[in-house]
Amino acid sequence: MPDWILSPSEVVRAFATALGTGDLLPHVVASLARAIPGFVLGTVVGVALGLVAGVSRVADLMLSPSVFLSYPVPKIIVLPLVMVWFGIGDISKVVIIALACFYPAFINAYYGARSTRAILVWSALNMGARPIDLFRRVVVPSALPMILSGVRVALALSFILLFAAEMVGARSGLGYLIKQSENSLRFDLMYVSIITIAVLGSLGDALLRLLGRRLVRWREGRP
Amino acid sequence: MPIVLPGLALLAWEIAARSGSISRIVCPSLLAIARELGTFAIRSDHLTEAWISLYRALAGFAVAALVGVPLGLALGRSPIAARLVEPLLSATYPIPKIALFPIFVFALGIGSLSKVSLVFLECLYPIVINAAQGARAVNRVVVWSARNMGASPIQILGKVVLPAAAPAVFAGFRVALPVALIVVIITEMIGSADGLGYFVMGALADLRTDRLLAAVVVTAALGWALDGLVVASRTRLIFWERHETYFN
């Protein structure tokens, strides 16, 4: 058996050891401190601009072509540029994660807002809704299911970008821990950090789905 | 109107670069970037890096499509297959597969094989899930009619289910292709001696931001070309149904 294959029981034991010695938790905290602000910043800006572009023709013409044009470009390629601009500290990681999260949030909010059924808008207008009410009470709720699926994609992307950014240039975090344990042939620690990333990814996704079920309770069979 | 914001950004960039108050490491002039871009046309070693990235992304994507579409169609049509595979699929779906890259490197080496395999794994999920959804949503009246007219299960799969699920299959392709490029670039940044990801890290180490940005433009061009290819083949193959949203 090659060295890099560990039995499940060995991995479990290594997990307990890493939790006990404090090899793991500081890196989890460091990773979350980068992923959460980046994810929140990117999705909030993306959803807000996407909704605005979905309801306003001027904003649509200004924003959408640039966003859709740059969408198929892998955002990770600008990581070195972001590092030149913002240094190799936490800010560059937050920026690159926010950039990657912006796109799915924008695109889904945009289509969500645009697919609002005209009859709902007409009814609200007929009942004397002001534009701001129309936006808050009609457009946003009807776009919500699509927004949530965009946010789910953004969460998955934020973990990929976090891992890449920490592997490339960081002194802490789970990506760094994986690279470090790989270099020092600490395979036990490597598996522990990989499993931790997997658990965090699944937890985040489960949380979002729970939130989605609470937020769009009126809609059947949709996440 | 669409060009207002990008135009303003480019103008501000060039003014900042020309003003001399900002280092050319932070903000190289557009001319310098264009000159570095030109080296991709005349220097074969630069072009090779782009080709290597493209080839890795396409290889992983192609295998994922070849495996993923039949698997997805089977999951969509056969309840037994769905019950066997789907729990595994939905449990592993939210896991960032990229974290497995170190294991892939130990198992398959630092060369193309580990990267292509990871691209395959990441692309497989959106392709399988979309194909399964498409196959599940096939109008059952159409299937019944075909069966009534004496079509064999194979004929139903090939002539009814596959065309009906094709828009969903292509939606999966359109999600998977950018993912393929992302994974290739990341794995090349982390552990590689070639490809565009390696190239940009080298430019960063040399503080050659102009070269770095030229590589960004080349990567962007690859992204557009691949996406354009998917959209063009979708429009040709699925002539009976128009795009509704961005993804299908």
Image: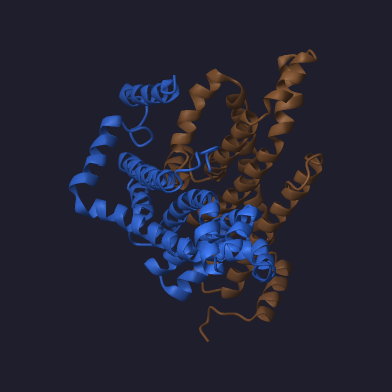
Chain colours: A brown, B blue
What residue sits 54% from the left and 45% below the top? Answer: A93
Where is residue A62 drawn, in percent x and y? 49, 22
In this rendering, the count of numbered labels is: 0
What residue sits 50% from the left and 59% below the top? Answer: B159
Quarter-of-image position of residue B97: bottom right
Q: Is residue B64 left or right of residue A98?
A: left
> Residue at the front extreme?
B149
Is A181 situated above or below A68?
below
Foreground residue among B192 and B165 = B165
Foreground residue among A63 and B242 = B242
> Residue at the bottom extreme?
A1
Foreground residue among B224 and B169 = B169
Quarter-of-image position of residue B151: bottom right
Is B19 situated above or below A156?
above
Q: Is residue A83 left or right of residue A9?
A: left
What residue sits 50% from the left and 62% below the top? Answer: B158
Where is residue A154 drawn, in percent x and y? 60, 45
Quarter-of-image position of residue B108: bottom left
Q: Is residue A177 among the parts visible in the rendering?
A: no
Where is residue A24 drawn, in percent x and y? 66, 63
> Residue at the left extreme?
B42
Where is residue A41 drawn, in percent x and y? 62, 37
Is A57 situated above or below A90?
above
Q: Is residue A142 among the parts visible in the rendering?
A: yes
What residue sits 70% from the left and 73% below the top? Answer: A17
The quadrant of the picture occupied by the N terminus of chain B is top left
Q: Is residue A140 left or right of residue B102?
A: right
